[in-house]
Image (cartoon, rainbow, N blue to C red):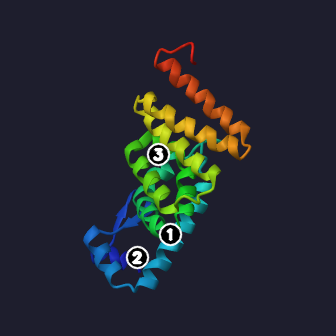
């Protein structure tokens, strides 16, 4: 079936034995689906990505070799899944970002902030403080990676407050170390 679609130029074979469609064909195919079918496919894609990135070691506390190539290969799917999650399940969207944290702040910090901001707005004020703190940690890292430690520090400080409010002293100390590094980067050794 896949070869037949390739022969008809409806699907293309990409690197790593992956397949993809031209954007216009993908859009047309998506229009043919009912809302329920489209939502079900996005849920399946999202579940697949969560499972894939659970083992990719791209979160900040992951142990083992990180598999950044998975994030690079799946980037288009992740963007689609995060857009869906913003509307349908922002908590799951934040979880997917956490699982890919090292990819986001090193490869596309601007888009990472956009995703974090959209998901935080969608999640609303009732978001668990620990989850909000992890999102702010990623937001801070995106600033830090582009050399704006002055903008990273307030994100980390807000995250520390939230983590202390839920008793996560270990993660709060981790972020205090980042704040100290940022202060040192700004030349404020005494504060660091």
Q: Is residue 134 left or right of residue 116?
A: right
Query: At 62% across and 39% down in the image, what residue appears?
Result: 161
Name the front one of labels 3 and 1. 3
User: What residue did someone put label 1 on?
Assistant: 45
At label 1, counting other C-alpha atoms closer than 10 Å, the crowd grade (few under 14, some 14-19, many 20 or more) is some
Residue 10: in sight, yes or no? no
Q: Splitting the image into 4 quarters, where does residue 163 fall?
A: top right
Q: Are marks 2 and 3 in contact (CB under 8 Å)?
A: no
The percent coordinates of residue 156 (x first, y second) are 55, 36
The percent coordinates of residue 11 (x first, y second) are 33, 72
Q: Which of 106 and 124 is in front in this view?
A: 124
Labels 2 and 3: the sequence-earlier one: 2
User: What residue did someone put label 2 on?
Assistant: 2
Labels 1 and 2: the sequence-earlier one: 2
Name the front one of labels 1 and 2. 1
The percent coordinates of residue 35 (x first, y second) are 41, 83
Query: Which of the image's four quarters has the C terminus?
Result: top right
At label 2, counting other C-alpha atoms closer than 10 Å, the crowd grade (few under 14, some 14-19, many 20 or more) is few
User: What residue did someone put label 3 on?
Assistant: 104
Q: Is residue 166 left or right of residue 124?
A: right
Query: At 58% across and 23% down in the image, what residue appears?
Result: 180
Q: Which of 123 and 96 is in front in this view?
A: 123
Q: Is mark 1 on a helix, strand or loop?
A: helix
Whole-number angstrom distance, CA of label 2 to CA of label 3: 32 Å
């Amino acid at each position: 079936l896949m070869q037949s679609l390739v022969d008809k130029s409806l699907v293309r074979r990409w690197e790593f034995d992956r397949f993809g469609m031209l954007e216009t064909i993908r859009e047309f195919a998506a229009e043919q689906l009912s809302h329920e079918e489209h939502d079900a496919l996005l849920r399946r894609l999202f579940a697949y990505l969560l499972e894939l990135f659970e083992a990719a070691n791209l979160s900040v506390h992951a142990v083992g070799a990180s598999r950044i190539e998975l994030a690079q290969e799946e980037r288009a799917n992740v963007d689609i899944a995060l857009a869906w999650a913003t509307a349908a399940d922002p908590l799951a969207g934040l979880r997917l970002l956490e699982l890919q944290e090292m990819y986001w702040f090193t490869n596309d910090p601007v888009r990472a902030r956009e995703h974090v901001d959209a998901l935080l707005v969608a999640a609303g004020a009732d978001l668990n403080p620990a989850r909000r703190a992890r999102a702010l940690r990623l937001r801070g890292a995106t600033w830090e990676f582009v050399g704006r430690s002055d903008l990273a520090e307030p994100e980390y400080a807000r995250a520390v407050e939230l983590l202390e409010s839920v008793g996560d002293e270990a993660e709060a100390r981790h972020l205090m170390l980042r704040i100290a590094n940022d202060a040192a980067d700004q030349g404020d050794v005494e504060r660091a």
